[in-house]
């Protein structure tokens, strides 16, 4: 059967559509893989003291050099999505403590007759508020300068060297503390809050810096780690709220909703698993391994990125 001109044109049109669809599907798959990797990097490096923001900057820079499409370093939408994934995972891990603290805080105010029993939890909440003040003030005053640091991979490398020093200090001197959560005081909250302020810079690990402030101040590792992650919750939640308007009006959400969704899920799941890994490493007193890692990655970033 001979092909007519009409049939040839139809087959050619189908072929063009097929190629276009195949190209779009391959592009989508590539985007999903890249965003999933970045979500996993965020999830792993949020609890683990190697700086999630710093690693996102480094990998975004690396992927860009490889010609892969990645969220820009100032992509607020992507930042909100993966940070929300990590926040939800950490809040889920501490869900029972969060519920108890919220109940105790408001019961202390509403029920004076029970204040003696509720005082430890109420005091913990007040210290938590104090600890978040330095990062809140610093973020408000220096937001523009902090944002500009996210476009400089070499700066991130320098900050990773500081993180390496923090972790080595913990390894050498941090495990001598014996004070538990019941012994937290105002100076502990202020000191850890100031260390969290430093971690606004990409490359300085938030968990690493706050653990340094807590454990070198005499807290045992459990008290320091728990207070550190409770400090993360209000600061992260506040940052998400501030950027929510930009997220809701972003034009990239509709175009990249599936890669964004994948990065959100991966970030949350990996964060939850990484929490367990961090606590195991803290119990084994092996944070020096991450100190060596940050030292090597920092030097590589300074020299080659």
Image: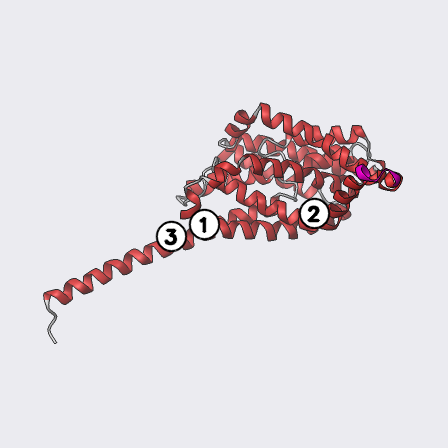
Q: Quadrant of residue 209?
A: top right
| Mark 1 and mark 2: Cα distance apart in space | 31 Å
- For image coordinates 20% across by 60% down, the residue present is 13
Q: Nearer the viewer, mark 1 or mark 3?
A: 1
Within 10 Å of disc 1 (Cα), the crowding (few <14, some 14-19, many 20+) is: few
Q: Is residue 111 magenta?
A: yes
Packing grade of label 2 (10 A; few <14, some 14-19, many >=20) is some
Q: Is residue 129 left or right of residue 73?
A: right
Real-space Cα separation, disc 1 to disc 3, in angstroms: 14 Å
Rendered-image quadrant of the N terminus: bottom left
Outermost residue toward the top? 141
Q: Secondary structure at mark 2?
A: helix
Q: Which residue is mark 3?
A: 27
Report the span colored magenta: 108-113
Pick whichever of labels 2 and 3 is earlier in the sequence: 3
Residue that numbered label 1 is attached to? 257
Q: For numbered disc 3, what is the local secondary structure? A: helix
Specify the quadrant of the image occupied by residue 120.
top right
Q: Which residue is mark 2?
A: 278
Chief SS of the magenta region: helix
In percent of the image, x 61 and y 36: which residue is there?
A: 238
- In this rendering, which labeled residue sits more in front, label 1 or label 2? 1
Against 265, residue 177 (above or below) is above
The image quadrant that residue 208 belongs to is top right
């Amino acid at each position: 059967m001979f092909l007519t001109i009409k049939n040839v044109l139809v087959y050619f049109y189908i072929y063009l559509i097929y190629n276009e669809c195949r190209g779009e599907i391959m592009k989508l798959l590539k985007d999903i893989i890249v965003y999933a990797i970045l979500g996993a990097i965020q999830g792993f490096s949020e609890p683990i003291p190697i700086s999630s923001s710093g690693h996102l900057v480094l990998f975004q820079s690396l992927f860009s050099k490889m010609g892969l499409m990645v969220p820009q370093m100032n992509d607020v939408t992507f930042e909100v999505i993966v940070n929300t994934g990590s926040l939800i995972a950490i809040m889920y891990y501490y869900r029972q403590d969060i519920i108890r603290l919220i109940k105790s805080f408001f019961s202390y105010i509403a029920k004076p007759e029970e204040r003696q029993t509720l005082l430890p939890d109420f005091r913990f909440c007040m210290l938590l508020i104090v600890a978040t003040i330095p990062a809140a003030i610093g973020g408000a005053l220096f937001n523009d300068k902090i944002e500009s640091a996210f476009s400089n991979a070499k700066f991130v490398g320098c900050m990773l060297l500081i993180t390496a020093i923090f972790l080595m200090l913990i390894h050498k001197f941090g495990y001598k503390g014996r004070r538990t959560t019941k012994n937290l005081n105002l100076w502990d909250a202020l000191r850890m809050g100031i260390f969290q302020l430093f971690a606004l810079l990409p490359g300085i690990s938030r968990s690493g810096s706050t653990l340094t402030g807590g454990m070198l101040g005499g807290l045992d590792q459990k008290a320091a780690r728990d207070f550190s992650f409770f400090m993360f919750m209000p600061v992260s939640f506040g940052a998400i709220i501030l950027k929510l308007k930009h997220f809701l009006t972003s034009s990239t959400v509709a175009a990249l909703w599936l890669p964004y969704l994948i990065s959100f899920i991966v970030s949350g799941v990996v964060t939850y698993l990484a929490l367990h890994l961090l606590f195991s490493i803290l119990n084994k007193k092996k944070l020096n391994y991450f100190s060596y890692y940050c030292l090597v990655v920092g030097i590589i970033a300074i020299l080659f990125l």
